[in-house]
């Protein structure tokens, strides 16, 4: 492997080599990139401290020996340890926002980012009218931060069971100067929230079934199990959200829950629960909405 240090000279050389090796290693892409080329570009540009959105001007630039060693080290980590690229760079992007992350939290990815970028229209008529919102299972704090930008007049509580995740979230909230708008709370869902009520409760909870957990690609096994696994049918948290949310919503309020590919499982488990399934540009039927009035 070290021989490539003397055989690959330009960024273009390293990019071609990385894409070939990524395919050869049969890596899985699902943490910000969905293909070998984009992920190789991301890792190489980050390692060389180059702008993440400007590749062409640097393609034929020759790398110094120390730069070649650094790039090789990062690419080897990706291939040998099967670490998600986001953990190697220490950052992830969601909805145009950058977040600092590490292995204490899952890599941010959510269909909610697209909804929040559009002001949660048409389900919320006036984002400025939202005065209180709750992000359950906040992880790195990414969705709470997006909510703060979408609902500028809202007091936002961001809850997670993991103290490690909340440490990461504190850093991200501070980076965006939102300490006065977002409160981070360690709690098992609603347990520590008392009688607080909200106009909007949003959650991207653990929803991976036990069968799916057993077959996850190695990349996902670096993420906290607590943030992924949700029992045999993936609905351990969803059941609690549907059972407990009404007493924490204001009349006219809305519960929004992301469940990935589990739409059929949710519908089978709650045949009598009125809910609306939302399509986003990148996915159909991944999020359901329930109103305060429709929660039993």
Image (spheres, grey):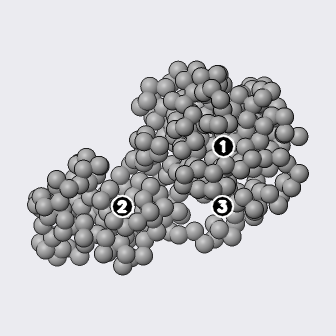
Q: Secondary structure at mark 3?
A: loop
Dot 2: element: helix
Horizontal side of residue 19 vs 157, given as left or right: left
Which of the image's four quarters has the N terminus?
bottom left
Name which quarter of the figure residue 45 lies in: bottom left
| Residue placed most toward the observer, 139 or 16 | 16
At which x and y percent is residue 264?
Answer: 75, 62
The answer to whether one can see residue 47 in this image is: no
4 relative position to 102: left or right: left
Which quarter of the figure is the C terminus placed in?
A: top right
Q: Say which residue label 3 marks.
A: 261
Q: Is residue 221 visible?
A: yes
**Which circle, 1 or 3, is nearer the viewer?**
3
- Residue at (53% x, 62% y) in the render: 220
Give the quarter of the image for residue 230: bottom right
Image location of residue 90, percent across then percent down: 38, 49
From the image, tell me which residue sits under label 2.
39
Residue 18 point in image, percent of width and height: 28, 69
Q: Residues within 10 Å of mark 1 (few under 14, many from 20)?
A: many
Q: Earlier in the sequence, mark 2 or mark 1?
A: 2
Residue 203 is left or right of residue 30, and the answer is right
157 is higher (above) or lower (below) than 221: above
**What kind of element bears circle 1?**
strand
| Cα gap from disc 3 to disc 2, whole angstroms | 24 Å
Q: Which residue is mark 1?
A: 203
Task: Return the residue nearer the eye: 200 or 222.
Answer: 200
């Amino acid at each position: 492997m070290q021989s490539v240090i003397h055989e690959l000279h330009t960024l273009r050389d390293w990019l071609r080599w990385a894409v070939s090796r990524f395919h050869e290693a049969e890596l899985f892409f699902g943490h910000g990139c969905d293909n070998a080329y984009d992920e190789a570009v991301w890792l190489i540009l980050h390692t060389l401290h180059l702008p993440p959105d400007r590749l062409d001007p640097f393609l034929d630039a020759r790398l110094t020996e120390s730069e070649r060693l650094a790039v090789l080290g990062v690419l080897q980590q990706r291939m040998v340890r099967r670490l998600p690229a986001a953990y190697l760079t220490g950052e992830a992007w969601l909805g145009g926002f950058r977040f600092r992350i590490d292995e204490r939290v899952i890599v941010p990815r959510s269909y909610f980012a697209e909804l929040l970028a559009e002001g949660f229209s048409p389900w919320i008529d006036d984002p400025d009218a939202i005065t209180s919102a709750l992000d359950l299972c906040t992880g790195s704090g990414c969705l709470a931060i997006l909510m703060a930008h979408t609902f500028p007049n809202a007091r936002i509580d961001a809850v997670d069971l993991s103290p490690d995740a909340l440490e990461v979230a504190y850093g991200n909230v501070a980076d965006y100067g939102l300490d006065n708008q977002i409160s981070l709370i360690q709690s098992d869902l609603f347990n520590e929230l008392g009688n607080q009520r909200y106009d909007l409760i949003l959650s991207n909870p653990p929803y991976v079934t036990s069968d799916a957990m057993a077959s996850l690609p190695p990349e996902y096994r670096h993420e906290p199990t607590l943030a992924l696994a949700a029992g045999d049918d993936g609905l351990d948290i969803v059941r609690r959200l549907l059972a407990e949310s009404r007493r924490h919503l204001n009349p006219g309020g809305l519960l929004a829950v992301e469940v990935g590919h589990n739409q059929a499982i949710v519908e089978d488990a709650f045949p009598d629960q009125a809910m609306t399934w939302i399509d986003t540009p990148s996915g159909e039927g991944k999020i359901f909405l329930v109103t305060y009035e429709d929660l039993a």
